[in-house]
Image (spheres, grey):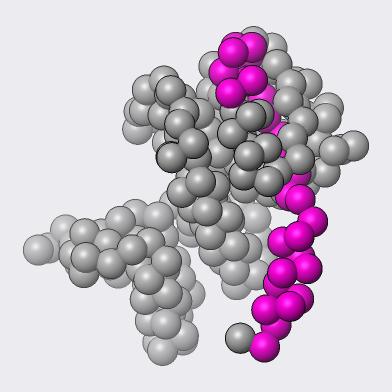
């Protein structure tokens, strides 16, 4: 594409990541992994400190452990997203439905299971950014943050259904929904709901 030079300039500046993890060893490992991926890192030991740090550090990405003293990772994600919207990755020792629902509300865009390896870190980072950009598109479409979050929950479910059915990746599933929404001149939320109810019939 014609703007590769511009893209290279943008990526030449190190992106900033804010890490909140109360375990010193895990914090060290995450910091090392992200520095090797070319990020400038600020690491803190709890959710409250993360919220305080976000204003001065202005990160492009945040990686929060779920279980932390003073403020857990999900509450921290919610508070941080309110100050400066950004993709948040949640690190957890276990996954649960309840956690997933709370996480979407809080602006979490990807998960990592412990122990975190560099092999899994890069795909999670890429996924978080891609989902975050999708969310920005949704927000532009509906113009209201609360409605965008509700729409995102439906879109995530619809994407999962399409990925399984059509054997496609997440990016393509989102594009399918987008194209359909433009074609029918209907909001993404409506198209996602159609996909979900259709899948219940089959």
Magenta residues span 2-29
Side of 171 where 76 appears, left or right: right
Residue 192 in percent (x, y) is at 37, 66
Q: Is residue 67 above or below residue 127?
A: above
Q: Furthest-left residue in view? A: 202
Magenta stretch containing residue 14, yes or no? yes
Q: Which residue occupies 27% across, 62% down? A: 163
Query: Looking at the rendering, which quadrant does residue 105 occupy?
Result: top right
Q: Quadrant of the N terminus?
A: bottom right
Query: Does the rendering let one see residue 46?
Result: yes
Residue 194 in percent (x, y) is at 30, 69
Q: Is residue 173 above or below residue 33?
A: below
Residue 86 in percent (x, y) is at 68, 48
Q: Is residue 151 above or below residue 116?
A: below
Magenta stretch containing residue 70, yes or no? no
Q: How many marks?
A: 0
Q: Which residue occupies 65% across, 70% down? A: 140
Q: Is residue 21 above or below residue 137?
A: above
Residue 69 in percent (x, y) is at 64, 10
> Foreground: 26 or 154?
26
Q: Furthest-right residue in view? A: 56
Query: Looking at the rendering, which quadrant does residue 10 occupy?
Result: bottom right
Side of 161 where 176 appears, left or right: right
Q: Which residue occupies 72% across, 61% down? A: 11
Q: Quadrant of the C terminus?
A: bottom left
Query: Does the rendering let one see residue 158?
Result: no
């Amino acid at each position: 594409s014609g703007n590769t030079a511009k893209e290279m300039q943008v990526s030449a500046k190190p992106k900033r990541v804010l890490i909140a993890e109360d375990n010193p060893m895990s914090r060290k490992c995450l910091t090392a992994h992200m520095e090797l991926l070319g990020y400038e890192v600020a690491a803190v030991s709890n959710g409250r400190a993360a919220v305080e740090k976000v204003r001065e550090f202005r990160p492009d990405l945040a990686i929060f452990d779920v279980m932390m003293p003073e403020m857990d990772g999900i509450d921290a994600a919610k508070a941080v997203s309110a100050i400066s919207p950004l993709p948040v990755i949640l690190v957890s020792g276990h996954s649960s439905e309840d956690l997933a629902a709370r996480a979407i509300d809080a602006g979490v865009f990807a998960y990592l299971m412990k122990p975190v390896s560099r092999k899994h870190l890069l795909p999670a980072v890429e996924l978080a950014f891609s989902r975050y950009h999708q969310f920005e598109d949704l927000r532009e479409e509906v113009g209201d943050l609360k409605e965008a979050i509700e729409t995102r929950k439906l879109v995530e479910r619809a994407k999962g259904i399409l990925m399984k059915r059509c054997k496609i990746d997440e990016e393509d599933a989102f594009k399918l929904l987008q194209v359909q929404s433009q074609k029918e001149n209907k909001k993404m939320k409506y198209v996602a709901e159609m996909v979900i109810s259709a899948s219940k019939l089959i």
